[in-house]
Amino acid sequence: MADQLFWDGELRPTATLHSVPRQDGKPTFKLTEILGPKSQIAFAIISSFSTSILWTYQFFEPRTPVILVAQPDFPGQTGVKNILPNWVMTVPLLSKERGIQHMKFMLIFYETGRLRVVISTANLVGQEWREFENAVWLQDIPPRPRPSFRDHTIADDFPSIMQYVLRSVNVGHALTNMLRHEHPNLPLKSIGDLCSKWDWSKVKVKLIPSIAGRHEGWPRVLQSGHPRLMKALRDSGLRTGIGRAAKELVIECQSSSTGSYTTQWLNEFYYSARGESAEDWLCEAQERRANLPWPPIKILFPSIRTVKEAVLGELAGLVLSSRANLWERTRYPQELFCDSNSTGGKVLMHSKMIIATFLQRSTPSSVPSSSATASPKGNEKNNPEPITILDGETESKSMDDCAGVHSAPVSPKEPIGWAYVGSHNFTPSAWGRVSGSGSNPVLENVNYELGILFPLYNEQEVEKVSCFRRPPRKYVLGEDRPWTQEE
């Protein structure tokens, strides 16, 4: 397995001590399998929120140069420093008040010239890889026979977005530091080499980053958070459309942390999840946006009962984050909460995943208008085969014509939905909040996050991808509560 290559990309849950073999029969990834033989690694860029540096160090040869993107010790400051022989740590700029560097990714450069890109939900901490279930997508990228010098300055394909991410989290300065001092022959001489030296033509997933900070104007807003999700959905032919021809969408959001949910933010996110522009959303009156009904979103988070019945019991709940005072608010979406249960066994999940599916309508009269959301609605299948990610139809539209398109796209191979996997918990801090106007939007992102998006074409694919049991069990109000560390 350590030498297996994945030229078409692969998504798998991670192996844990307590769910191998898995009840659902799905294949898994171990960290050693993801990295491959350490003697073959020429260079690596790795990112994690929480990192056990000495534990991570054992997976690399001491001679191998590694750049670690980490959480700043002092928010508001950015910097680069040597932390071990051949290891450089870099931290991005964060607000002094709040925010975290939460991205979990790896770029592994091998002696053969091959590059492996990894998007994960797991931090680089031993316990998370042993005790808790996570999800990992990876793909091997071959080197180009000769560099390609096409203009990537305005592109938003996978490698161009990845370059934007690397610059945003201060990898450029760390790379320059390594090249100038002990490692002048790195396979990556500049961040721009990522596009020009490797062949990304077989990568079909869309990259979805959140970049901490204030983003103003459409060009910047569309690069981050849930507006980036919206743009990727449009480019993949996955928008619902608006008006009578619109598709109805239900989204199931698996998270290891809950947030401060309001009807305005949930509808704001849902609008982007439909592939519809925030330009239209921001044209709605503020008072109306603040008083919409809850959208058809299912928020998956382990109940107290699920945590207590897990293999490690309440001790395992320390990896989860939820606050009792939020749950007890008068206006909190308790009716949207569902239990989070792994399809692999009685282990807790640190995975962050969204499964979105289009619903078939029984009558035309059930189609919502463009200014309203649908009301919330309340078979498990085992398949050991990993998911092969296919491409969707491409539909690229500028924000100027968003309001003029009123029907969902039709393609010869019609998707039934889509999936997101990555570091984003289902929270406003991760996905961002939009304000401003339709002509000059403002996006506020608190965290740095990174994940992937891809279409789903049938129910079998939905079940292969989903890390949680479907349909998720709805909380019984008055009996179920989300787990908190205060329990």
Image: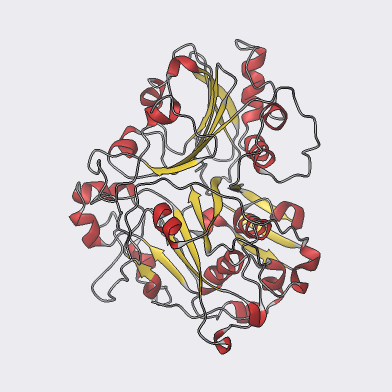
Which residue is pictured at 37% across the width and 75% down the height?
A: 335
Taking the image as shown, residue 372 lies to the left or right of residue 130, namely right
Q: How many marks?
A: 0
Which residue is pictured at 45% across the width and 14% down the height?
A: 39
Residue found at the very far front of the displayed protein: 412
Residue 225 place in picture, x, y as percent: 60, 54
Q: Quadrant of the N terminus?
A: top left
Residue 245 showing in the rendered view = yes
Residue 113 place in picture, x, y as percent: 60, 20
User: Compared to 200, does 483 lie above or below?
Assistant: below
Taking the image as shown, residue 92 lies to the left or right of residue 475, namely right
Taking the image as shown, residue 152 lies to the left or right of residue 225, namely right
User: Compared to 329, does 73 lie above or below?
Assistant: above
Which residue is pictured at 78% across the width and 60% down the height?
A: 398
Residue 393: image quadrant is bottom right
Taking the image as shown, residue 32 lies to the left or right of residue 297, namely left
| Colour mapping | secondary structure
Which residue is pictured at 33% across the width and 59% down the height?
A: 381
User: Compared to 92, does 219 lie above or below?
Assistant: below
Of 485 and 249, nearer the camera is 249
Q: Quadrant of the C terminus?
A: bottom left
Residue 121: image quadrant is top left
Residue 370 showing in the rendered view = no
User: Compared to 123, does 427 lie above or below?
Assistant: below
Of 354 and 433, nearer the camera is 354
Residue 14 place in picture, x, y as percent: 36, 40
Of 327 and 102, nearer the camera is 102
